[in-house]
Image (cartoon, rainbow, N blue to C red):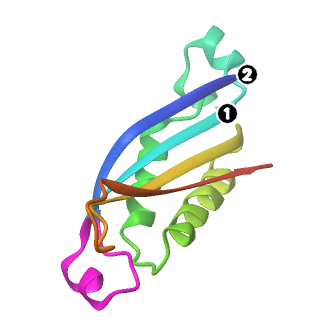
Amino acid sequence: MGVIKLKNIKVYAYHGCLIEEKKIGSDYRVDLKVNADLSESAISDKLSETVDYVHLNHIVKEEMAIRSKLLEHVAERILVRILNELPLVDKATVDVSKINPPIGGNVEMVTISRNKKR
């Protein structure tokens, strides 16, 4: 078993319930952790026998580009695609953070965390 982490994927996107968020957008941070059997690739040194983190990053960027009202919805789409497209992944956890959310206070970020397993 093994773990692959992608930390602090920076994305500009247009998620949120407010009209301003739809027009102006905001900075987001995505952190991803996947658990997978990496024993074959550890021996073979073949990309085809592991979870390609370039593919993971691609999924995150594509799903973040699709507007949603809720961060939970974006996170769910990311998790579903990972499990559908990468059969070696047993479990995935994603944190989606909105930087400087418009909530009427001095808040660095709001984060939702979701996980899904086979």
Q: Position of residue 21 (x, y in %)?
A: 28, 80
Residue 32 located left or right of residue 49? left
Kind of element beneath mark 2 = loop
Residue at (35, 45) in percent of width and height: 9
Residue at (33, 73) in percent of width and height: 103
Q: Quadrant of residue 33?
A: top right
Residue 38 located left or right of residue 60? right
Q: Nearer the viewer, residue 3 or 23?
A: 23
What is the number of the mark on residue 1? 2
Residue situated furthest right in the rendering: 118
Residue at (55, 49) in percent of width and height: 94
Kind of element beneath mark 1 = strand
The numbered mark, 2 or 1, whose residue comes first in the sequence reads 2
Q: Are marks 2 and 1 in contact (CB under 8 Å)?
A: yes
Q: Nearer the viewer, residue 62 or 99?
A: 99
Q: Report the number of numbered marks.
A: 2
Residue situated furthest front in the rendering: 105
Q: Is residue 6 magenta?
A: no
Residue 14 located left or right of residue 79? left
Q: Residues within 10 Å of mark 2 (few under 14, many from 20)?
A: few
The type of residue carrying mark 1 is Asn
The type of residue carrying mark 2 is Met
Q: Which residues are magenta?
A: 13-26
What is the number of the mark on residue 7? none
Residue on which the image places disc 1: 35
